[in-house]
Image (cartoon, rainbow, N blue to C red):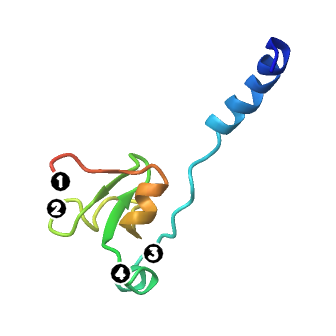
Amino acid sequence: MNVRSIIGLAPLALAIADAPATSVATFQKEREAEQHCPTDLVVWLDPPTRTYFYRGQARYGSTKGGAFVCRTEADHAGMRKSRGSQ
């Protein structure tokens, strides 16, 4: 591979790096999320902060615009667990 072909690939690499993360199926009811991912843990996602919370945490089920999601899907989409969670 020569220098020109490497330079030619740079825009493609940037496009891939800027691609949006995988989407996450969101649910307004916890039970719906449990049915969608019966073998996974259901968490509460706060989309603006891209953070999810576990049952028992203060923000679980309570942030404006949030939704219940499957933890594995959230992880694959680049979401992160809240600070202080294990």
- Closest to the observer, 48 or 15: 15
Q: Which mark, by number, is residue 57?
A: 2
- Precedes in sequence: disc 4 or disc 1: 4
> Which residue type does callout 1 highlight?
Ser
Q: For the N terminus, which image quadrant?
A: top right
Name the residue located 41 percent from the left edge and 51 percent from the top edge.
79
Name the residue located 38 percent from the left edge and 84 percent from the top edge.
38
Q: CA distance from mark 3 to mark 4?
A: 16 Å
- Disc 1 and disc 2 in contact, CB within 8 angstroms: yes
Mark 2 residue element: loop
Q: CA distance from mark 2 to mark 3?
A: 18 Å
Q: CA distance from mark 2 to mark 4?
A: 21 Å
Mark 4 nearby-residue class (10 Å; few <14, some 14–19, many ≥20): few
Label 3: which residue?
Answer: 27
Name the residue located 45 percent from the left edge and 49 percent from the top edge.
78
- Precedes in sequence: disc 3 or disc 4: 3
Label 1: which residue?
Answer: 85
Q: Quadrant of residue 52?
A: bottom left
Mark 3 nearby-residue class (10 Å; few <14, some 14–19, many ≥20): some
- Precedes in sequence: disc 2 or disc 4: 4
Mark 2 nearby-residue class (10 Å; few <14, some 14–19, many ≥20): few
Please state which of the two labelled residues, at mark 3 or mark 4, is closer to the viewer: 4
Q: Residue furthest front?
A: 1
